[in-house]
Amino acid sequence: MQLVILAAGMGSRFGGLKQMEPMDEAGNFLLDYSVYDAKKAGFDSVVFIIKKDFYEAFKDSIGKRVEKLIKVDYAFQDLNDLPKGFKCPEGRVKPWGTAHAIYAAREFIKEDFIIINGDDFYGRDAFMVAAKYIKSLPANSVGKYANVAFKVCNTMTENGSVKRGVCFEKDGMLERLVESSIQRNKEGKIISSPLDGSTPFEVSEDQPVSMNLFVFNKDLIDNLAYKFPLWLKDNISDLKSEFLIPTVVDELVHEGKASLKLLSTSSVWFGVTYREDKPAVVKALKALVDKGEYKAGLY
């Protein structure tokens, strides 16, 4: 089983490179905790998807730590990494999106894998749930994808709105995912405002939301190789458009090429969407260390 970490994005709202921000007294990053938890859950290799520009800094910090624990590969998300016949338009600076990031790692992905964001803390249980699902699949499964969903109340920040994929299920399968901006209002209610501009709606505290922890079979790479040129034909001239993994998965499900099981976790998500979030994350990690869930220094 492979762990694929999306770590190529710069944290504009955070005010810096979130993936390389120390979060405990030992100087560990949130990425360190994710790799540590994944290894405990049975994952045996990790692919970091990063920008080539900060490869040396990344390898000299987190890379040299985790390489002692797990097999590591590095993939570079590059604007010019496009299918034959396509050229990056002049003026494009925004990365092509999360689906393109996975496409960039195509030469390293050889087995069932999960993806996570590099600037999020998912918790041990989330990795255990994902690993259990992978182990339950028959060998060489195709299109048997899953999403590990969190209770929305376990993913909030007090410092502003957050983007979440609101999950609607039927018989344990994801039926619909609404990409939304979520925030508590003055009355304490959690309001989901769909990013497509449709009518906002209230969600319950335990509403499942996607935190981009997907489980995939390796056939996803073939699906991305097929989908990406089609997407580029329609969107390449839009300099801010993104080839996003939730959109690709939704298309595959509706085309009957994949199914998406919704898995639940008791884990509490931590993240640094805003710089003001950091003190709370540092405090939460210290509490977990004090409780013995992680050893001081981690490695």
Image (cartoon, grey):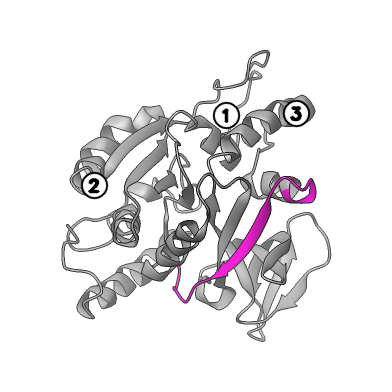
Name the kind of residue labelled 1 in the image: Val
Residue shown at the point (20%, 41%) measured from the top left: 64
140, above or below 189, in the image: above
Nearer to us of marks 1 and 3 is 3
Name the kind of residue labelled 3 in the image: Leu
Name the kind of residue labelled 2 in the image: Val
198, above or below 238, in the image: below
Which is nearer the eye, 276 or 226? Answer: 226
Residue shown at the point (56%, 75%) measured from the top left: 151
270, above or below 13, in the image: below
Describe the element under mark 3 as helix, strand or loop: helix
Number of residues whose C-alpha sits closer than 10 Å to that of mark 3, classed few (under 14), some (14–19) or many (20 or more): few
Query: Dividing the image into 4 quarters, which one contains the C terminus?
Result: bottom left
Number of residues whose C-alpha sits closer than 10 Å to that of mark 1, classed few (under 14), some (14–19) or many (20 or more): few
Count the marks: how many?
3
Q: Residue 292: in sight, yes or no? A: yes
Number of residues whose C-alpha sits closer than 10 Å to that of mark 2, classed few (under 14), some (14–19) or many (20 or more): some
Q: Which mark is residue 66?
A: 2
Where is residue 150? Give x, y as percent. Answer: 54, 70
In magenta stretch: residue 258: yes
Earlier in the chain: of badge 1 and badge 2, it is: 2
Farthest residue, direction top: 85
Magenta segment range?
Answer: 253-271
Nearer to us of marks 1 and 2 is 2
Q: Which mark is residue 230?
A: 3
Task: Give left or right: position of 280 versus 231.
Answer: left
* Distance (Cα) linking label 1 and label 3: 21 Å
Residue at the spot of label 1: 93
